[in-house]
Image (cartoon, rainbow, N blue to C red):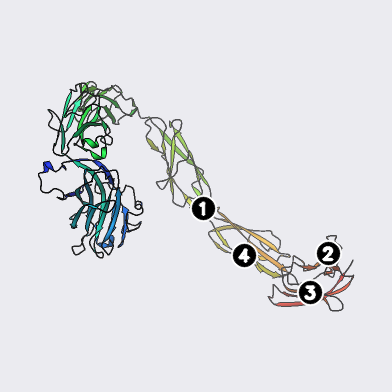
Amino acid sequence: MKYAITIIISSLFLWQAPRAQTCQGGLGDPIVNISFGSGSGVGPALANGITTLQYVTYPCPNDGQYTITSFTSGCFSSWLTITQDHTGDASGYFMLINASYNPSDFYVQTISGLCGGTTYQFGAWMMNVGVISSQIRPNVTFRIEKTDGTVLQTYNTGDIPLTSTPNEWTQYAFYFDTPPGVSSVVLRMINNAPGGVGNDLALDDITFRAAGPSVMSHVAGYPNDTVTLCDGSVPVLHLASTVETYCYTSVVRQWQLSTDGGTNWNDIAGQSALIFDVPPAGPGSYLYRMTVADAGNAGIKTCSVSSDPVEVDILRLPKPSVNISSSPYVCTGQSVIFAAAPVDGGPGPAFQWKLNGFSTGMVTGDSTFVLSAPVSTDVVSCVMTSTAACAVDPVAVSNELSVPVIPIPVTGVDMMTSADHICQDSLVVFTATPSNGGASPSFFWLVNNSVVDSSGAVYSTSRLRNGDEVSLIMKGSLRCSPPVGAPEVVAMTVWGLPTISVFSDTIIAGGSSLMLSPAYTGDIASYLWSPAQGLDDVGAARPMARPAVTTAYRLDVVSAEGCRASATVKVEVYYDLQLPGAFTPNGDGVNDVFRIPPVVPVHIRRLAVYNRQGAMLFLSENAGAGWDGTVGGVAQPTGVYVWYVEYDDPVTRRVERKKGTLVLIR
């Protein structure tokens, strides 16, 4: 992602003097770099005491709030969409500020580790995040103070303008001097503009760097700062440096080397002269630079400045080679693809493919070759020309490769079915018989041209519908076996099942009869009722039933196509309620309880037992409950007792009442 940056360096402390005498032409490594980190979502809050703003964890802070984030989008319909920090890192955090209503300090931090009597550059990257021209512009004053509050330098940004594009950061930088003996300063950022609509900004990468004389380094005899050489032919390189002489009374110089891309620098022992002869080295990337410091600060990294690095890249000598590969075999009539795998081919190797020792065409950058209709005796090879730097012999010849051509086997498959005319719920079994299918052919069963099963040579189902067409495709396990379909396509005839709708269970009076009259669908050819007791015709569609006792009748029907269905209806028989005249509650398990006989289909409203004096001894509304001849656990004597029952007659559906006597025998 592209991003735009602008650098504004204050003229404070320059006094309009010639640049060569300002002691600001060279910079050291950042001794402080407050980048706010990186990650996804929002970052952690600043340490206590740095800001008076309120930290929030959402990307659109309100007035007097801030967040640490890597993006902001569509806030308040008046902010820029920012998708990266000032370095272009989409996951890099920055501080997003919605300033307070009243001008105030919004960032205060003590910076330690400086050198006394040294010039430093302070820098901070900022952006006005507003998009509306009428919004209040952010206006910030930077102030560098001693820890006792003495002001060392002040710089004002003025009104920070709107940017023309998102992600357009500007660096505001200026210089200041630390007094002798001062190693810590206070950085104070002051919001000068009022809050409200506007005064919203982003802040990133706050840096402090030692400033000093201009230092420049180069490799003698080479026009650029990057020198690329081949291993084995590396000459002695002459590094040269120039240093401005106006800044330090006594200057200390030191050549440094980095082998990790500039992350870490190490002094080169004994090399402090302006000229340094670098002896030949092995393959690798080497960065060299000259560092300069005042003699009183020698060896202190936070007090030194350095040149831009000179890069020396020594490339290993490549050994170009190439290997070609293809599929292990090809079927007759098919094409085969050969692929070249180059080693040390460089950024754009060229390939010359050969068939049976003869070139197949022009040299190209295509690392693949397609051979149409090959034969087993064809031999393919490749010549690669490497474009790798420092290649002594760029031409490499591949291995030779022949691919076996397998003839296509003749295969077949037949399909048999257990039935093609079935009832709707019937199971039908299809069986495949392969011919030359190999040890483990695959079978694909299709219903109406859609695969429904691929588990094996047998397909069983009871879900077919009338008119479904079943077919079969086999893929043999022999090499180059093509898919082959069975010549048979089975068109299924599926008959619907007959249906029976019976009336709900019913009750009739003993000695009476009723017609069993279910409703039917389908072309029914036969009827069979069972059991036969009480029926006038077991083969009739609607027989008369006169059962002597409660009976469940089962009906089985068969359609003209042989499809079957069944149903059951229960006829309960009710005789006038009769209660026993005596019972013997002696615990022998026989006739121990006076109750409604359990076979009588009647609903009891009330069953009561009285003694001869009219006292009620037992009362229940449950037909399953009965009197065991006791009252309160006390056995009642042998004698005559009176019972009374109130019940619903299941035939007449009226409330009936009866009473009688019983004898308790002990």
Q: Residues under labels 4 and 1: Cα distance?
A: 26 Å
Which residue is depicted at the point 24% across and 39% down?
303
Which residue is depicted at the point 20% across and 33% down?
252
Tag 2: residue type? Answer: Asp
Establish if 46 lies above or below 137: above
Residue 257 horizontal/vertical position (percent): 24, 31
Q: Earlier in the sequence, mark 1 or mark 2?
A: 1
Of the pair 531 and 170, the residue shown nearer to us: 170
Mark 2 — residue? Answer: 592
Of discs 2 and 4, which sits in the foreground?
A: 2
Q: Quadrant of residue 543?
A: bottom right
Q: Earlier in the sequence, mark 4 or mark 1?
A: 1
Mark 3 — residue? Answer: 608
Q: Earlier in the sequence, mark 3 or mark 1?
A: 1
SS type, badge 2: loop
Q: Which mark is residue 424?
A: 1
Q: Earlier in the sequence, mark 2 or mark 3?
A: 2
Q: Residues under labels 3 and 1: Cα distance?
A: 57 Å
Q: Earlier in the sequence, mark 3 or mark 4?
A: 4
Tag 4: residue type? Answer: Arg
Of the pair 56 and 353, the residue shown nearer to us: 56
Residue 211 horizontal/vertical position (percent): 20, 42
